[in-house]
Amino acid sequence: MNPDNTTAVKHPTPQGPDIDSSLLHELVAYLRKNRTELREEWARRITDAQLLSVMTPDEIFSEATAVYDNYVDALETGSVETLQAYARDLSERIIPRGVETHEVLGIVLLLRDVLARSLFVNYQHDADLLDRILDAYEPAANRIAVTVGVSFVEERERVIREQQESIRELSTPVLQVRERLLILPIIGVLDSQRARQLTEQLLSSIQSNRAKVVVIDITGVATIDVTVANHLVQTVEAARLMGASAIITGLSSKIAQTLVDLGVDLSMMKTVGDLQGGLEEAERLLGYRTLEEAFDGLEG
Amino acid sequence: MSVAILRQGDYLIASIQSDLSDSQVLALRDDVADRVGTHRARGIIVDVTALDVIDSFVARSLRSIAVTARLRGAQTVIVGIQPEVAIAMVQFDLNLQPLRTALDLDEAIALLDSWTAVRTADGR
Amino acid sequence: MDDEIRIPIEGDDDLVPARAEGRALAEKLGFSRTDATLIATAISEIGRNIVVHVGRGELLLRPVSEPARCGIVVIARDEGPGIRDVEAALNDGYASNRGLGLGLPGTRRLMDEFLIESEEGKGTTVRMTKWRARDELERLRERRGEMADPSEHLPEVDAPD
């Protein structure tokens, strides 16, 4: 006790400051001794609950074994590090197969239930001992459930993030069609964030490809609002500062009208109806002759 | 040396090496004005690749260089505006009109060549 | 405030480190290169106003953090003559009798929040902020960094010795 009659407690624990470590030993020993039956019981309940349906019964049993052993180790050592590492590894393997968060949480909670029920059955003759064993077991079991759940969710979010990045990159491709000429086809919904990203990617490509003309094709854009229209205008101006001319193609009459209504000065932008026309205009700017001109020159 | 000014034929190339203070920008402006006269340069290229900020003062000064150069018979081209700087300038609503810009030195020289060719073709 | 950076402005030379510090802090806070450039440009404009119109003042750069976003606050303070007509100064096309605008409308366009307080004879304070969104993954990582063990908040079972 401290001089002011308080007891320093580092982590307040509901079961009181003194856990009988022999209880924990007993608990762990019991779980190891009954490993086979408890594991089978658990696997059976997983199948009954129709969890991990993407996996075969053999796979479920094999993973169940690994999880069970890790679980008991974590109970014994009080350390969840190994369990965390295993959970992340497991998540990495099962996420691509379509296992969902509720399934992972579900099986972990089922294991907790199977073990708790078994403890109850085994120690029911001694209410006081059962009480103390559960006091030792419950918080540890909960902690393990949280660890596994969180590891899975984090891994899942990492995967989602990677996919988002890929989608973003794929959806704003800047194509070099010939020397000094870039095409940026824009497809889908254009929001402020994506528009900014597009601009950055385009300008960066102008630099790396030494482009003199860029054709921005918005055939695939359904609607456009004032923010996005401004982004488009700004992109054209920024390209000009970098010495490149921009041609906007695929302007539907609807979008053209929207831009006019929004007060966007279309005279500042080169616009051409369709992509083909835009490319011809671009080649003209670059000094190439079009195929038609070339053929005209050949005949007669 | 914060700015290196080189001569290439009829052209002057002012290459900015690092972020400049306002006084250094003004010194550059005066320096270029002198040299255009001295060398009878027909074109000036200002390379701003190393500038990661172009604000209203720099923009004004670049325009000022162009005006002075024009009075002495030279065209000006700005090269090397970085993508992020271009975006900032446009968002701020800064433009360098009527200054011409080009991506890099080669482009700028090609541009100046085409202008001076036109002018000599016209006999002026 | 620990993370605050104070930059005294006494001459145009001071704008060079001001721009550099602004960019450095922005990049440290995870802003993109483009946003860092916007911030440095705004700092340059607002710092120059102090140099040109007042002669001396100071810039304060402050990181700010919220659950869903983090940002940088730039405060530019001087005790100069003040701006007579702030409203007009915030409109494009305003020019003082020197023929130069204050660059305020453009600077405002670079930032997300922009507040200006000015009193004739007392001085001017500009406070501008740029934000960037923090997504869940970033917040998760931060929490994971704070907690060595994700379930630390749950009661622990004493390990056997």
Image: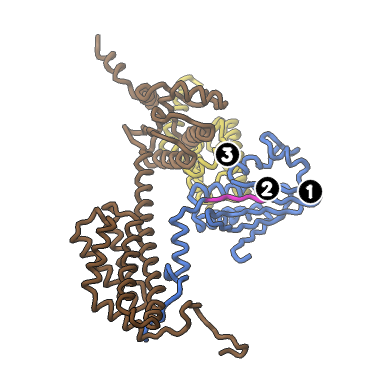
Q: Quadrant of the C terminus of chain C?
A: bottom left
**Of the residues tagged 1 and 2, which is closer to the observer?**
2
Residue C15 drawn at (x, y percent): 62, 53
> Does residue A263 lie above or below C105 as drawn?
above
Dot 2 lies on which element? strand
Dot 1 lies on which element? strand
Q: Residue furthest right?
A: C121
Left or right of A180 in this view: B95: right
Left or right of A198 in this view: A159: left
Residue C60 drawn at (x, y percent): 64, 57
Dot 3 lies on which element? helix
Give the residues in magenta.
C126-132
Q: Residue at x 38, y 26 (%)?
A: A282
Q: Which label belongs to residue B62?
A: 3
Q: Residues within 10 Å of mark 3 (few under 14, many from 20)?
A: many
Residue type for callout 2: Leu
Read off the chain for label 1.
C
Left or right of C34 in this view: C54: right
**Residue annotated with mark 1:** C119
| Marks 3 and 1 in Cβ contact (< 8 Å) | no
Tell me which chain appears yellow.
B
Q: Please identify the quarter of the rendering in which residue A249 is found.
A: top left
**Residue annotated with mark 2:** C115
Tell me which chain appears brown.
A
| Marks 1 and 2 in Cβ contact (< 8 Å) | no
In-front residue for pair A190/C54: A190
Q: Colour of chain C?
A: blue
- Marks 3/1 same chain: no
Q: Please identify the quarter of the rendering in which residue A44 is found.
A: bottom left
